[in-house]
Image: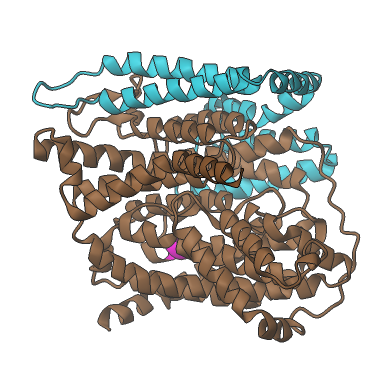
Chain colours: A brown, B cyan
Amino acid sequence: MDTFINGLNLVLTVDTLLVILAASLFGIFVGAVPGLTATMAVALLVPVTFYMDPTPAIAAIVATSAMAIFAGDIPGTYLNIPGTPASAAYVGESHMLARQGRAREALGINLVCSVFGGIFGTVVLIVVAQFLAEVALKFSAFEYFWLAILGLSCSIFISSGSKIKASLSLLFGLLLSTVGLDMMSGAPRFTFGVPDLMAGVNFIPVMIGMFALSELMKYYGSHSENKKVNMTSSDNVFSQVPVHVKKYWPNMLRGSSIGTLIGALPGAGADIAAWISYAVSKGKSKDKSQYGKGHIEGIVDASSANNSGISGAWVPALVFGIPGDSITAIVIGVLYMKGMNPGPTIFMDGSGLIYALFIVFILANLMMLPIGYMAIRLSKIFILTPSRVLMPIILCFCIVGAFAINNSMTDVWIMLIIGLISHLLISNDFPVAPAILGLVLGTTVENNFMSAMMRTGGDLTSFFARPISATLGIMVIFIWCSPLIMAIYKGYTQRSNV
Amino acid sequence: MRDLLIGLGFILAGIVTIVTAQKFPTLPSLQFGPSLFPSLIGGGFCIGGLALSLSQLNNIRLLISRCQDMGIKINAPRKLLTSLLPAALIVFYILSSDFLGTLLTMFIIMFSLMMIRKTRFLIAFSSSAILSAVIYFLFSHYLLIPLPQGTLFEGSL
C-alpha cells in the first residue's frame, strides 16, 4: 500500500500533470497530421524527456502514444488517409460514415473505444505483469537467451510480407547491436576508430533516423500535398455512443482482448492488432455485407484493439525487457537512461515508480476523453495544417534532438546513415520492426549466450537442461519449423481431398 | 530487379562483415570470441541476400515487370533527388553549423525546404525565422544543450 501511495505522490504533482497535458496535446497533433506516426512522435519526444525526472518522462511517452493512436482516426475519417498506420484497418468504414454526415458520430465511438481499450490493456498489464514478474525471477541467462530469441523469431513470423526481407531487416538490427566494445574481451567492434562508437550505437538517433528521417524523405519524394475537407459535420460526438456501446459491448471486449494479446507479442504493434481485430470482427459479424459501407461494428473492434495493443506491448517490455512494439523499444531505452532497468526486479522496487507508471496509464487514457472531444471539435484545424511548413520543422527537431543525446555530431551522422538505409529498405517493402527488435535484443542475446557458455564451459546442451529453458527452446524450434509443418499439412489435406 | 540488387548488396555486406569480424582480437580462454555473432550475422546476410536474389531470378516474368516499374521510376529523377533533400540538408548542417551557427543553419534549412514545396515567401521566411529561433532557444537556453553558436558572428547568435 505504501508503494502505491508513493506512486500516487509521484504522479499527482503539478509538473507531471502538466507534462501529461502537454504530451497529450502533442500526441493529438502528431496523430492527426497524416504522415506523422505515433512512433515518430515518441522518437522526437525522447531528447526532451532526457531532461525530465523518470515519472514525467515515462508519463510523456505514455500520453503521447495513446493520444496519437486515437488521433490517427481523425484524418482517416475526414480524408480517408489514416493519421497513423494503426488506423488504416478501419479507415474505409470511418470515411464512409463521414460521407454520410456521421463523421463526429464515428469519431465519438472511436474515442470511447480507444479509452476503453487503453484502460482494458492497462488492467491486464497490472494483473499479468506482476504475476509474470514472479515467474521471471527464476530466470537465468539460459531462459533470457531463449526469450530474446523467441521475441526475435516472432518479429519475423508475425510481420506481413516477405519473411526473407523480415529476416534481413532483423539481421541489420542485430549487426547494429554488435557495434562497440565486446562485453567479454573488451575488443572494439565496427567502431572504425570513432571514440563515440565505443559504447555502441546510441538508440535514440537510430530511432529518429528510422522513423522520422525516412518519413521526411518519403514525403519529399512524393507528390505535393492535397488536403481538402469536402464534407461538413454537424452531428453530435457522443449522442449515439450509448446506443452503440449497448449493442457492441462484446465487440469492445473482444477487440481489447485481441489487441492486448497481439500487442504483447514482440514485433506486432497496434497496427497489426487493429487489422487482426477488424478481420475477426468481419468474420464473426451477422452483417458482413455492411462492412466497407460505413459499419460501426468494425470500428468498435479495431479501435478498441489498437489502443489496448499499446498497453499490452508494455507487458513483455516491463517484465522481460523485450519490447512488444516500436514504441516500447524506445521506452526500454528511456527506462535504462532513467535508471529503471526493465525486468522482474522493477516490480520489487519500493519507490513506487511502477505504480506511478500504472497510474499514468489510467490517467492518460481518461484524459483522452476530454482532450479527444476537443480534438474532434477542432478536427479541421489539425488535419489542414500544411505539411510543407511542418516537415522542415520536424527535420530541425531531428537534427537538434539527435545532437542533444550526447552533444555530439556523431549521433547526427548515425541518424543520417540509418535514415538513408531505412528509407531504402522501407521503400522496398522491408519491415522495420524486426530491425528495431534486433537492435534492442541483440545485446541481450549475445551477452546471455556468452555468460551461459562461460558458466557451462561451452556445453550447448545446457540450453535444454532446465525445464523453462527447454520449453522456451522447443517453442522457438516450433516457430521456425511452422512454415514446414504448415506446408506438409496443406499437402496432406490437398491429397486427402483428391 | 530492385530486390535482386538489394539481395546482392546484402551478400556483399555479409562478406565484408565476416572478413572484418575475423580481425577482432580474441582471448585464448574464451571458447566463443567477439567475432562469433558478427560472423553469424554476416553469414545470415549472405544466405538471406542469396535467397532474395534467387527468388527474383526464378521468376522471369516478375523480373521483367519489375524492370518496367523501375523504368518508370528512372523517368522521375526529380522525385529521387527531392527525397534525398532532407539527407543533403543534414550534411549541410553538420558541415556548416560550426561556422554559421545552429540558428542560422536551421533557418536556411527550413526556408529552403518550404520554398521547394512552394510555400509563400512571406510565410516561409517568417515561420522559418520564428520557429528556428524557438527551437534554438528551447534547446540551448532551456535544456542547456551546447548547440554550435558559429564563428561567423563570433558566437553572438
- Decide whether residue A58 is among the magenta residues: yes
| Residue A182 appears in the rendering | yes
Please give left or right for residue A477 compared with residue A383 in the image.
left
Q: Between residues A95 and B116, which one lies in front from this camera angle?
A: A95
| Residue A353 appears in the rendering | no
> In the rendering, at what x and y percent does residue A481 appear?
40, 40
Tally the marks: 0
Image point 39% across, 48% down: which residue?
A151
Q: Between residues B54 and A493, which one lies in front from this camera angle?
A: A493
Image point 65% across, 56% down: which residue?
A30
> In the rendering, at what x and y percent does residue A111 appear?
66, 73
- Decide whether residue A249 is among the magenta residues: no
Quadrant for the N terminus of chain A, please.
bottom left
Image point 64% across, 78% down: which residue?
A370
> In the rendering, at what x and y percent does residue A333 appear?
38, 49
Point out the stretch of residues depicted in magenta: A56-60
In the image, residue A136 above or below residue B26: below
Please identify the dominant SS of the magenta region: helix
